[in-house]
Amino acid sequence: MASKFFGSLFGGAGRDPEPILDDQLPLTQAQELEQTRAALGELRTAIRKAGAVVPVLASSRMRQTDDLLANLIDYVAEHGASTEQRVLLNAIITDYLPTSLRVYRALPPETHTETSPESEKLLEQLDILHSTALDLDHQVRTGAIAELSIHGRFLADKFDVDGIRLNPGPREGETH
């Protein structure tokens, strides 16, 4: 039941879980957080490498968000968090932020301007992710998990995280 819930939040619905082999043990929370911390390090490297391509405001927003997430990892390591909160933290670091950056970098170079519609969309996505990270930080620190599923459903609906593009929603004048 829980795997179906998490799958629906992060695009894994309908997939059977991979079996755990005898020589594989489930990760402890500490191991899980270390993997998340390593993924954040990789994300920070990718952000630095993309510095010449990504608009200044987007780069700044990504750095603010990764600083927030690094502090949150430290807090969770010391005080703990629910499984749902750790899943969302990991998804932001390993999926949502890297996908936004990767998709933007894959766009034609002429779209890599401070004021292009593509840059505006990237900034909008980064603002949503930063706001979600702030909300997650607040939830973890206050122990509030009631709103978490709402955030997960919102992100799943807002972002088409298939490794190719993020769902920008309807363009002006379009309807779904």
Image: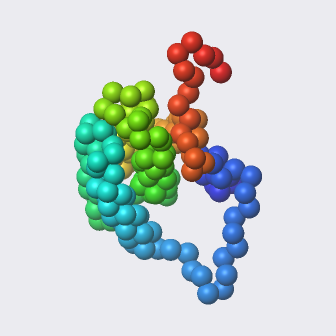
The one of 86 and 146 positioned closer to us in this rendering: 86
Rendered residue at 69%/69% (across/down): 18
Spot occupied by residue 48 in the image (x, y as percentages of width and height): 28, 55
Q: Is residue 166 visible?
A: yes
Residue extending farthest to the top is 173
Q: Residue at x 65, y 53 (%)?
A: 12
Residue 165 picture quarter: top right
Q: Nearer the viewer, residue 174 or 4?
A: 174
Observer able to see residue 135: no
Q: Nearer the viewer, residue 53 or 140?
A: 53
Q: Is residue 137 left or right of residue 6?
A: left
The spot of residue 140 in percent (x, y) is: 36, 50
- Is residue 29 left or right of 7 when viewed as pictured? left
> Which residue is pictured at 48% across the width and 47% down the height?
106
- The image shows residue 43 at horizontal and vertical percentages of 37, 58
Count of labels shown? 0
Q: Residue furthest front?
A: 110
Residue 124, above or below 133:
above
| Quarter of the C terminus within the rendering | top right
Instruction: Spot the residue most to the bottom.
Output: 23
Does residue 53 appear to the left or right of 12 in the view shown?
A: left
Residue displayed at 48% across by 41% down: 107
Which color scheme did the rendering employ for the protein?
Answer: rainbow
Q: Please tell me which residue lies in front, 53 or 77.
A: 53
Q: Percent x, y for residue 171?
A: 54, 21
Q: Quadrant of the N terminus?
A: bottom right
**Quadrant of res 77:** bottom left
